[in-house]
Image (cartoon, rainbow, N blue to C red):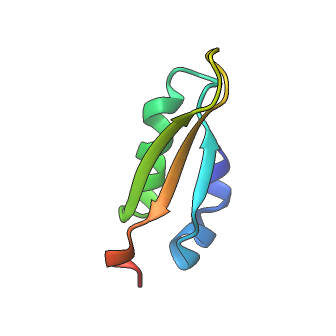
Amino acid sequence: MLLRGGEKTITNNHPKIAISVYHKSSDFWKIPEQTLRIRSDYKIYLRHYTESIYETVMFFIPNKENIR
């Protein structure tokens, strides 16, 4: 998964992340689980951009209270 390759960057830089989560139904719980395992100080938002099942994006925003 993409997050494994970016683990060092996520840990060290705490970037904002946007990930499409409509490819598999398990993405809705696996992606946040994996991301929060790397860093638990993200706020998570979900945005749906179309009327169909596609274009649903999960955003991980650094929690400003916990920035290193």
Considering depth in this image, is 56 or 37 the residue closer to the camera? 56
Quarter of the view holding residue 20: top right
| Residue that extends furthest to the bottom in the rendered view of this protein | 68
Q: Residue furthest left?
A: 65
Camera-nearest residue between 65 and 27? 65
- Quadrant placement of the C terminus: bottom left
- Write the residue at 48% across / 53% down: 35
Residue 48 image position (x, y, % from top left): 56, 31
* Residue 15 screen position, x and y as percent: 58, 69
Q: Exactly how many numbered labels are in the figure?
A: 0
Image quadrant where one finds the N terminus: top right
**Image coordinates for residue 27, horizontal then vertical, percent:** 53, 31
Left or right of 2 on screen, residue 67: left
> In the rendered image of this protein, does residue 60 appear above or below residue 25?
below
Residue drawn at x 53%, y 49% as measured from the top left = 59
| Residue located at (56% from left, 67% from top) | 10
Say if 30 sits above or below 11 in the image.
above
The residue at the point 62 percent across, 17 percent down is 51
Q: At which x and y percent is residue 61? A: 48, 61
